[in-house]
Image (cartoon, coloured by chain):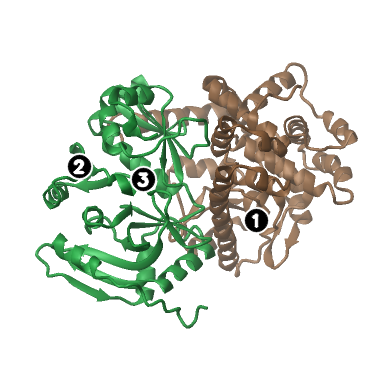
Chain colours: A green, B brown
Amino acid sequence: MKVGDLSVSETRDRLMGQGIRLRIGPMVTQLQVRFPNLAQHVHFLYKDTPFIDEPCIVDFEVKLAPPPALRRWFQGGAAIYLDGIMNFGPFDPAIAMPMLEWCLNGCVFNRPNQYLILHSAVIERDGRAAILPAPPGTGKSTLCAAMSLRGWRLLSDEVAMIRPSDKQLLPVPRPVGLKEGSIDVIKRFEPTAAVGHAWPGTRKGTVAHMRPPADHVARADEPATPAWIICPRYEADAATTFEPIPKADALLYVAHDAFNYSLLGTTGFETFADIVDACDCYALVYSDLNEAVGVFNALTPPRATAHPDRS
Amino acid sequence: MTSPNDLLLAVLRDPARMTAFSPDQWNRLLRYARLTKLVAKLGYLAQEHSLLDSLPGKARDHFTAAQAIATQHQRIVRWEVNRVCRALVGVDADVVLLKGAAYVAASLPPARGRLVSDVDIMVPKAIIGRVEQALIDHGWEHINLDPYDQRYYRTWMHELPPMRHIDRQAVMDVHHTILPETGRLHPDADALFDAAQPVEGLPVKVLCPTDMVLHSAAHLFQDGDLNNGLRDLTDLDDLLRHFATQPDFWDQLVPRAVRLDLQRPLFYALRYCHDLLNTPVPDGVLQAARVARPAGLALPLMDRLVTMAMSVSKAHQRPWVHAWARWTLYIRSHWLRMPPTLLAKHLTHKALKDWFAYSPGAK
């Protein structure tokens, strides 16, 4: 069953009650939302996401609810509880939806340390995936949202989740966060894009989320093989440039911003070094999304060359 | 005393129970284990009992993820110990590692899956000033320069105010004995140093087996650090099971407690390990330790409080009862820590400080 198989009011009843167990890639999140007016937004963003009705082991128990009375009066009317403990907040209920999305991201960033987790968007075509590492503000989410609307499958706009045993990238298809100007950029780029309500007043300004295309969510169990590491940077009015970069630079650039690269120690290094060996690495500077799409569409399979010192 | 009906304690006593768990039981177990920082340890227990293949993949994933963090902690602790040794090269001192750092450095069973938040070392009081200076020269600094806290540690406690390395952010506690100087019990620090044992490949020592158990017991039941109560009890369980194989360990344990003035904490440690975790303790040792039991209603009360504080499911179902038990034990530990007038002054100071720190407009 998918969330979209439920009506908004059924979704609301479940979120207000025992919760909905969302299956997002390899993770199961038990989600409860104690604000009835938010059910429509959850329903919109997770329409294509499957949920599990029968009892199962869950990875994260997330509850968005009013905090205890005293803190509600002084600090804000909403809080997010992770495994029963207040994790976010209290904050203004007017920004509850973006806060919930950040918390759900945070769960994926911090918990599943059985995988190597890099801070990168991942898109795939013909079984080959491009890892797009980039710090916030470089336009990574906007770029991967655009790519997902032009024939590339979205695995994630935030995390490259890598299984160390076979170096495969696991999809975590969650709503794509868009900030400020990017919201209209994507709406103009593709008017049919499923962009949800825009929430002003967050610490990152106005935020909206785009629901990934339905077939991308449906293929959440299909991993992809890393083929390219492409470090994108949006620069207003810049001409598109696409240059190879040394593999060592790519490794350090990604490792620097990764979630658990150092935590995994040797496993982290070995896994990622193998991936860098197998990938072609580039830096992309762009200002025009259509030109950037053209660059991706022109990619050729990597000439896998193992580093002489690593065999 | 009866064993409480607690899911996590039941699994710690008999890990094989996990093989028959329903998803709902798994969710509760993992939640409790996360709260008590025992997820990684459950994974190692499952492995040692050859249960991993009979567990759900999802449960194994949780174990693997938690073990990755524990492994990182150990790597950090080993490196911190290496750095401390380097910083103290010029100081001719006996350095004894305590608690987590000792378990990791000496590769003892409690190290498996244990999260180690800071490094504890013990040095002779006569040279603690030189050790402190050497650490400052090598990049450690005091975390809190509040004059009251500085005086509190230096005058009354058994350790320097906590220090942190400016680059690596690792926290270190430098002790000169194992219990506060103002407290009721006064273990002889010289005896601890004399019996300390070398660690293979490192210029540091760890406490000898009996002393390691006694220190762990004193930390939990005398100094009253119950933040990780159940985790610390499993440390004791691991140590007792491990050292039980050494000749003379059981024979020496109670006499050593007498020598170090730690009979009461040892009594509690053996009692609650045995009752809550089924730790095998010879009857003769349990009997000998009973000599130090508290009189009258104190023991039944302590039984109730400790059982409540160690039972996570209780904390979940009745958080107030659990919080009350922890609070009472906290007050008890402070009562044991310093004489009443000093305690009154200290708690008043802390309460006023907290009040002003949390009042609106403060910061």
| Viewer-closest of A74 and B32 | B32
Residue B3 visible at all: yes
Please say if B129 is above or below A245: above
* Image position, residue A255 (x, y; %): 40, 64
Quadrant in the rendering for residue B83: bottom right
* SS type, badge 3: helix
Quadrant in the rendering for residue A283: bottom left
Q: Is residue A95 left or right of residue B257?
A: left
* Image position, residue A288 (x, y; %): 13, 62
Residue B363 visible at all: no
- Which residue corresponds to mark 2? A195
Q: Which chain is indicated by disc 1?
A: B
Tag 1 near tag 3, CB within 8 Å: no
Q: Is residue A47 left or right of residue B122?
A: left
Under mark 3, the amino acid is Ala
Mark number, residue A218: 3
Tag 2 near tag 3, CB within 8 Å: no
Rounded to the nearest whole Å, what is the CA distance between mark 1 and mark 3? 45 Å
Q: Is residue B313 left or right of residue B272?
A: left
* Image position, residue B45 (x, y; %): 69, 45
- Which residue corresponds to mark 1? B104
* SS type, badge 2: loop
Under mark 1, the amino acid is Val
